Amino acid sequence: MSDTRLTLRVDFGPGRSIGPGKIRLLEAIDRTGSISQAGRTLGMSYRRAWLLIDDMNQCFLHPVVNARPGGSQGGGAALTEFGAELVRDYRAIETAAEVAAKKRLRGLEAALQKSAPKSAEPRKTSIRRRKP
């Protein structure tokens, strides 16, 4: 498959979900040891990164990130044991879904027109379901 990919988001109910963006943020924090550096790496502000982490910390029974305030000692952030487990579980679910969907995705890809749409800008075509 060329550009075709499966994107997975797990919804836990109204306003509670985990998806590729939050997982990438957790992985970046794990690599950099810093919320601000992780945010910069992903092209987001510190505030946006912090709000996403706070959202995840509030969503689960256990926090996903422990942060140490900055100052003369320097700050930092690290995934908790639960945060690391969350990343592993999400990636395992993602891999299983990709394996299960591979044949059908190839079929969909084969059904695509040979050339991309004429507009230079990619169009967002997802439709959000309205709440009843």
Image (cartoon, rainbow, N blue to C red):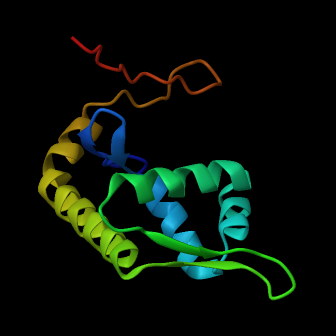
Q: Residue at x 54, y 62 (%)?
A: 25
- The image shows residue 19 at horizontal and vertical percentages of 38, 51
Q: Quick check: 36 above or below 55?
A: below
Q: Nearer the viewer, residue 129 or 47?
A: 47
Regarding residue 1, the answer to whether it shows in the image is no
- Can you give x and y, in whole percent of width and height, for residue 123 in the image? 53, 22
Asked if one can make out residue 95 in the rendered structure from this viewpoint, the answer is yes
| Res 16 quadrant in image | top left
User: In this view of the protein, which residue sits in the foreground, 4 or 47?
Assistant: 47
Left or right of 14 in this view: 103: left
**Residue 24 percent coordinates (x, y):** 50, 62
Q: Is residue 72 left or right of residue 14?
A: right
* Nearest to the observer: residue 32 or residue 97: 32
In which image quadrant can residue 114 be found? top left
Q: Is residue 6 left or right of residue 93?
A: right
For the point 34% across and 68% down, the residue is 62
Q: Name the image quarter holding the C terminus.
A: top left
